[in-house]
Image (spheres, rainbow, N blue to C red):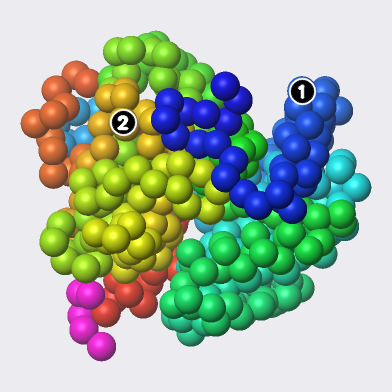
Amino acid sequence: MKGRFGKFGGRYVSEVLMHALIELEEAFEKFYPTDDFRQELDGLFRDYGGRPTPLYRAKKISELVGCKVYLKREDLLCGGSHKLNNSLGQALLAKRMGKTRLITETAAGQHGISAAMAANVVGLDVEVFMGVKDIERQASNVKRIKLLGAKVTPVETGMGVLKDAVSDTLREWATCTRDTHYLMGSTVGPHPFPEIVATFQSVIGKELKAQIMEMEGRLPDAVVACGSGGSNAVGAFRPFVSERDVRLYFVEGGGERLDADNSAAAFSLGKPGVLHGAAMQIMQDEHGQIKPSKTRAAGLNYPGRGPEISHLCDSGRVKPCHAFDKDVFEAVRVMSEKEGLIPALETAHAIAYVLNNGKEFERDEVVVINYSGRGDKDLETIVRYFYGD
Ligand SMILES: *Cc1c(COP(=O)(O)O)cnc(C)c1O
């Protein structure tokens, strides 16, 4: 069934949104397959975004781990992370649908920035909903979003964090679907969002597959990606899901420890449930209330795992794992000193998993880490961790 991934997914929304979701589903099915849409999107990916992003052989990390490690360099995409792939795709789709305005929500601000960039490229207005706590914590990204001309609307409901901003954006959308598109930031939300986001992000996996065939003459033995909603992971994994010999690893934010209140390891600690219109694996308390996590990687704090990654982990195709903070910061240090690359804290989770689990990878094995973003945005957190205030 469309929009279902095993027992996950679906469209659990109020009637007022049904029409907009069906309109969006039909528009995606109509426009996405056309040459006209593909050419325009590919052109933007290439000339504005800088695609294809390179696949880089990390020699020093390879020596440390004891296998061949490659990095898929999404940090080199314009904006510094994979998020623009999805934002450009949805902005273009909204334009084709005749919408004039985008609304979206953001936690760390990374998605807000990519949405504002894409809106400007395509020619749409944009409004970004952001929890008041996050506005405080992410002051420099709020400045970037404003500089790009987007309106930033503070969300004071609930705890003033990402899950509340998503709820408010869905509420706002219900009042203005005629001229407004909700630019969902990850592979979450009601159908068709998870499918649309995964489709636009799968440019990562398609390029990666061609590049590794060119460089190694064969498929990789493993692909490793960090995640929360799952968009960079699903984007990298999709072309390999049917290749049974390719092992896939999804690395969540472990926090300080699994029993610490900042752990975001939803596959170890959470349960299936419904959030923001879809069934998925969710961090929740014993009463079924959503439990927001507080890992230091702001981009890993969405409490749900999107339907597709939830299913891939549930069915055993993808191995869910997690990395703890101290190993994540160590991975930042190692990557910076050995390879000259400062990774985003989110990305450092995937790196930490590979660095700490060398025994899972044999000497001649080829392992690709999806290097989802660069660490400039995390500089203060990183410096504070190593050197104190
Ligand atoms: C937002 C973000 C993530 C997590 O989002 P997914 O949808 O799970 O990919 C990971 N890495 C970086 C650099 C991000 O900005």
Q: Marks 1 and 2, Cα distance to the nearest angstrom?
A: 30 Å
Q: What numbered label is drawn on residue 242?
A: none
Please tell me which residue is depicted at 33% across the width and 12% down the height of the picture. Answer: 244
Count of numbered tags: 2
Q: Toward the viewer: 234 or 43?
A: 234
Check if residue 7 falls in the magenta segment. Answer: no
What is the x, y in percent for residue 38? 77, 29
Q: Which one is in front, 217 or 375?
A: 375
Q: Which residues, given as a range, are shown in magenta?
A: 385-389
Q: What's the residue type where badge 1 is placed?
A: Pro
Q: Please report the residue visible at 27 percent of the width from the left and 79 percent of the height from the top.
A: 384
Residue located beneath label 2 in the image: 314
Query: Residue 125, position in %: x, y?
Result: 82, 64
Residue at 46% x, 42% y is 279
Task: Say which of 195 and 337 sits in front.
Answer: 195
Residue 180, quarter of the rendered image: bottom right
Main secondary structure along the magenta-highlighted residues: helix
Query: What crowding class fits label 2: few (fewer than 14 Cα within 10 Å), some (14-19), or many (20 or more)?
Result: some
Image x and y of residue 42, in percent: 73, 33
In this view, the residue in front, 80 or 143, is 143
Q: Earlier in the sequence, mark 1 or mark 2?
A: 1
Give the answer, above or below, for where 50 lies relative to 37.
below
Three-letter amino acid code of the residue under disc 2: Asp
Does residue 191 appear anywhere in the picture?
yes
How far from the left and from the top, in percent, is residue 80? 53, 56
Question: Residue at horizontal 62%, vertical 49%?
Answer: 13
Element under label 2? Answer: helix
Question: In which quadrant of the rendered image does the N terminus lie?
Answer: top right
Which residue is disc 1 drawn over?
33
